Image: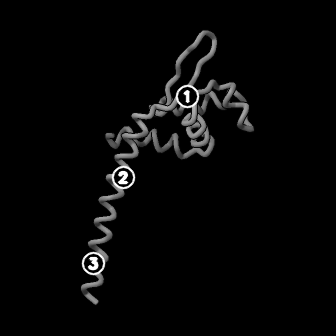
């Protein structure tokens, strides 16, 4: 995932409520009303959080009659996970090299 696309993703995930919404949607798609029942905030606030998650490409909305159901975009999260794993592995290698160098100088 290009770095320019990561900023809105991390901004969206940095909010505790949005993280909880994403976690909840990870179990099953839900409407804003259904989500609001599990949070101490209004349905309108949930919709605003969902808008941020949708703009970041983490959830999608599908209209079914009068109801809009939101679901997680698994491919996007999987891609993000792979990118983070790659970055983490690179840092692990670097830190191991630094450790080896420090230990060899002792």
Point out the image quarter for the C terminus.
Answer: bottom left
Q: Nearer the viewer, mark 2 or mark 1?
A: 2
Image point 36% across, 52% down: which residue? Answer: 85
Q: Earlier in the sequence, mark 2 or mark 3?
A: 2
Q: CA distance from mark 1 to mark 3?
A: 47 Å
Q: CA distance from mark 2 to mark 3?
A: 22 Å
**Percent position of residue 46, x then y:** 65, 31
Q: Residues within 10 Å of mark 1 (few under 14, many from 20)?
A: some
Relative placement, left or right, of 3 versus 27 is left
| Label disc, if present, on residue 85 of the rendered structure | 2
Report if the CB atoms under discs 2 and 1 are less than 8 Å apart.
no
Which secondary structure lies at badge 3?
helix
Residue 21: image quadrant is top right
Residue position marked by numbered label 3 in the rendering: 100
Q: Where residue 18 appears, x then y in whole percent? A: 58, 39
Q: Left or right: 14 with respect to 37?
A: left
Query: Which residue occupies 31% across, 77% down?
Result: 99
Element type at mark 2 = helix
Q: Is residue 66 above or below residue 9?
A: above
Q: Which residue is mark 1?
A: 51
Q: Earlier in the sequence, mark 2 or mark 1?
A: 1
Quick one: label 2, few (<14), some, or many (20+) residues within 10 Å? Answer: few
Closer-to-camera residue (28/20): 28
Quadrant for residue 91, please give it.
Answer: bottom left
Q: Secondary structure at mark 1?
A: helix
Is residue 89 positioned above or below 73 on the image? Answer: below
Judge from the rendering whether residue 28 lies leftward or rightward of residue 85; answer left or right. right
The image shows residue 35 at horizontal and vertical percentages of 66, 31
Q: Are marks 1 and 3 in contact (CB under 8 Å)?
A: no
Q: Quadrant of the N terminus?
A: top left
x and y percent of residue 97 in the render? 26, 72
């Amino acid at each position: 995932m290009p770095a320019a696309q990561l900023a809105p993703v991390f901004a969206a995930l940095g909010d505790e409520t949005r993280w909880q919404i994403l976690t909840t949607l990870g179990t099953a798609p839900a409407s804003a009303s259904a989500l609001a029942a599990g949070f101490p905030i209004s349905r309108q606030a949930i919709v605003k959080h969902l808008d941020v998650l949708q703009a970041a490409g983490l959830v999608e909305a599908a209209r079914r009659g009068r109801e809009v159901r939101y679901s997680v975009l698994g491919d996007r999260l999987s891609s993000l996970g792979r990118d983070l794993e790659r970055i983490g592995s690179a840092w692990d290698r670097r830190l191991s090299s630094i450790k080896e160098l420090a230990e060899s100088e002792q």
